[in-house]
Amino acid sequence: MRFDIVSDTHGRLSNKLLEALKGADAIMHAGDCCSYGDYQTLCNIAPMSMCLGNNDWGMDYGPDVQRVTRVFKCGLRWQLCHYEERLDLATCDIAVCGHSHRPFVHRVSSPGGLGTVLVINPGSPTFPRTAEGPTIARVMVNNGSVESAEIVRIGEDDGDGDGWSIARLFRRFS
C-alpha cells in the first residue's frame, strides 16, 4: 500500500503536487492545510488522515482531525502531529510531523527500548525551506511492514513564480 505524506500546503495545491499524489492508496497530512476546499480535493484523491497545524486555527475539518491524530492502517500505528517535539514516540510505529518545511526520514529508538519508530517530515510542496525544493514523502507498506520510506521531489510549483522558497532564492543568486 502506498502512503503519500504531505504537510504545510497552506491553501495551495499545485498541479505538480496533485499529479504526484495520483495513485496513492492513502494520504497523510501533517497540518497547515489552511483550506477546506483543499482538504476535500485531497480526500477525493485518496482516503486522508490529517492533524491540525498552527495555521489551521478556526478551520473545522470534522471530528477526526485533531491536534494529534492517531490512526491504525495496514497493521501500523500512525501518529500525526504538526510539531515534531510533541510526537509521542512510545505510542506509534510511524510518526509524521510538519511545521519546519524541511524534509527528513529517520528511525529513532522507541522510548523503553521496544524497537524503533519511523519519524517523517515531508517538507512542504508549497513553501519549501531547503534547496531540495517542493517535496512530499512516500511510504510503501506490505503486510504491516514498511518496505520503503523516502522524500520525493515533486518539481517546481508550475512555474507561476508566486510563493517563497529557498530553492528559488538559490537559483536567483547562482
Image (cartoon, rainbow, N blue to C red):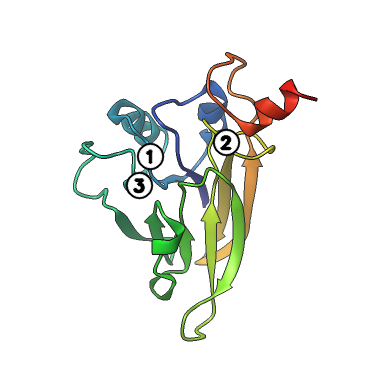
Q: Amino acid at mark 3?
A: Met
Q: Is residue 78 visible?
A: no
**Mark 3 vs 2: CB contact within 8 A:** no
Going by the image, does 85 lie left or right of 105?
Answer: left
Distance from Cα at disc 3 to Cα at disc 2:
19 Å
Q: Amino acid at mark 1?
A: Asp
Residue at which label 2 appears: 128
Q: Of 133 and 13, which appears nearest the observer?
A: 133
Residue at which label 1 appears: 32
Q: Residue at x 47, y 69 (%)?
A: 93
Q: Of 104 and 165, which appears nearest the observer?
A: 165
Distance from Cα at disc 3 to Cα at disc 1:
10 Å
Q: Residue at x 21, y 37 (%)?
A: 58
Distance from Cα at disc 2 to Cα at disc 1:
13 Å
Q: Which-is-in-front pick, marks 3 and 1?
A: 1
Q: Position of residue 7 (x, y in %)?
A: 46, 42
Q: Is residue 11 visible?
A: yes
Image disc number at residue 139? none
Sequence-earlier tag: 3 or 2: 3
Q: Residue at x 59, y 68 (%)?
A: 107
Is 108 situated above or below 74?
below
Number of other residues with Cα within 10 Å of mark 2, as a class: few under 14, some 14 to 19, many 20 or more = many
Residue at which label 3 appears: 50
